[in-house]
Image (tube, rainbow, N blue to C red):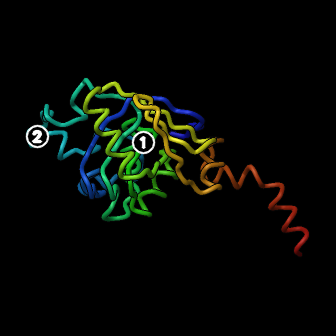
Amino acid sequence: MKQKFDIITSSCVPLPLENIDTDQIIPSRYLKATDKKGFGDNLFRDWRYNEDGSARQDFVLNDPSYGGCILVAGKNFGCGSSREHAAWAIAGYGFRVVISSFFADIHKNNELNNFVLPVAVSEKFLKELFDCIDGDHQTQVRVDLPRQTVTNLATGHGEHFEINGYKKHCLTNGLDDIDYLLENKDKIEAWEQSNK
């Protein structure tokens, strides 16, 4: 799942619901696994499938007219429990970016740790995105991590988004926390030697 970020341009999958919690993202019955593999298959499981396992045709992930690696979700995305499995499921499904007007803090960090970029935008910009995607399922959005901008290519409107400098460095270079430490091993050892 480690992938370098730069500029991503993609169509979007809209989920205009507020307060989507981590139990809706990945139901608790799937939390026994400790390996990230396969979690994408159960992303939004109870919304995607009927009890008999058949796909719900009215759910957006089962609608072939939508696609892309950007999920656009309503306000307060990732609230509820702190399960990292929710971020595993989002990444495992293939989403690289989640756009919302507000993210629960722990879930936001879990996404960043799993190479999914959470982009917080204004309510006005989020509504415009939902409206454009509703009108044209192939609406393209450009997310520029180096410049920290998100642009609705259908209207040309864009916004700046915030990201922690350390996490930006890690995403830009495809590094997790351990990779970052290894990248700075010489500096760490030099500091240890100078402080003996």
Type of amino acid under label 1: Ala
- Residue at 74%, 49% in the rendered image: 183
- Residue at 61%, 49% in the rendered image: 168
Q: Which residue is mark 2?
A: 50
Q: Secondary structure at mark 2?
A: loop
Label 1 environment density (alpha carbons within 10 Å; few <14, some 14–19, many ≥20): many
| Residue 140 position in % (x across, y down) | 41, 28
Residue 32 falls in which quadrant of the image?
bottom left
Q: Return the mark for residue 24.
A: none
Type of amino acid under label 2: Asn
**For the image shown, how many numbered marks are present on the structure?**
2
| Residue 71 position in % (x across, y down) | 36, 40
Which callout, 2 or 1, points at the residue further toward the start of the chain? 2
Q: Which residue is mark 1?
A: 91
Q: Tell me the CA gap for discs 2 and 1.
A: 23 Å
Residue 23 vertical placement versus 99 (above, below): below
Residue 14 falls in which quadrant of the image?
top left
The C terminus sits in image quarter:
bottom right
Q: Is residue 195 left or right of residue 157?
A: right
Q: Secondary structure at mark 1?
A: helix
Residue 84 vertical placement versus 173 (above, below): below
Q: Is residue 156 left or right of residue 176?
A: left
